[in-house]
Image (spheres, rainbow, N blue to C red):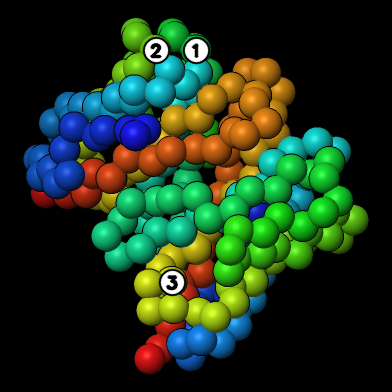
Amino acid sequence: DVKVTQSSRYLVKRTGEKVFLECVQDMDHENMFWYRQDPGLGLRLIYFSYDVKMKEKGDIPEGYSVSREKKERFSLILESASTNQTSMYLCASSPLGRRKSEAFFGQGTRLTVV
Amino acid sequence: AQTVTQSQPEMSVQEAETVTLSCTYDTSESNYYLFWYKQPPSRQMILVIRQEAYKQQNATENRFSVNFQKAAKSFSLKISDSQLGDTAMYFCAFMKPRGGSEKLVFGKGTKLTVNP
């Protein structure tokens, strides 16, 4: 059974803290994605990666960075957490350029910044 | 840049009836994938159905089918014989496969409630 695992389901952090959200997939997928989900705004892409050490900015990268040192792991970093980063964060992975391409999602991390 | 628009923030339907969710997209590409994803209240996002743009035939998966109109850039989802378990957020998504940098773009979602 395919799996995308996010390290935490709920997280509470203080303003100004450096926050790490971890995502691991066991499907040998090339593509990995980080989204934030807010009511009425849908899923907005923060960053994605199509290979180890490769990354591209999504639509809302400000205040975030990412790391992909190994194929199976994609980390989202909030350099200095702020209250407007309180949100649901979803990680996803997908195989590269195949006809049966689909994205698989983790269970989400609800981050609250206080 | 590709954009995906879902014009219905919320919809409701009676159990056993049929409902159609709308999605339009904007792209200059000719080859791409379109998806409908479902997110139940438990949060795990799962794929409902997928359409490859080069295929003219509309995709179907049991009670779920799409109406893909490539020229109109429209991709609607029809749910037949609605069930209580269909209550969820539904997201339309677009991906252009190009051997690297395959960004997956979502619409804002439609909240569907199936009433008993």
Asked if B11 appears above or below B31 in the picture, the reply is below
The residue beneath circle 2 is: A71
Q: Position of residue A65 (x, y in %)?
A: 36, 23
> Is disc 1 placed on a helix, strand or loop?
strand
> Is disc 2 placed on a helix, strand or loop?
loop
- Name the disc covering residue B112, or none: none
Q: Position of residue A30 (x, y in %)?
A: 50, 18
Quarter where residue A13 is shown: top left
Depth order, front residue of A69/B59? B59
The residue beneath circle 3 is: B86
Work out how far the residue at label 1 is from the one at label 3, CA to CA, in angstroms: 35 Å
Asked if B93 appears above or below A58 in the picture, the reply is below
Q: Chain for mark 2?
A: A
> Is disc 3 placed on a helix, strand or loop?
helix
Asked if B6 appears above or below B71 in the picture, the reply is below
Question: Crowdedness of circle 2 by 10 Å Cα count: few (<14), some, many (20+)?
Answer: many
Which amino acid is tagged 2? Lys
Which is in the foreground here, disc 3 or disc 2? 3
Q: Chain for mark 1?
A: A
Are circles 1 and 2 on residues that touch, CB within 8 Å?
yes
For image coordinates 39% across by 41% down, the residue present is A105
The residue beneath circle 1 is: A51
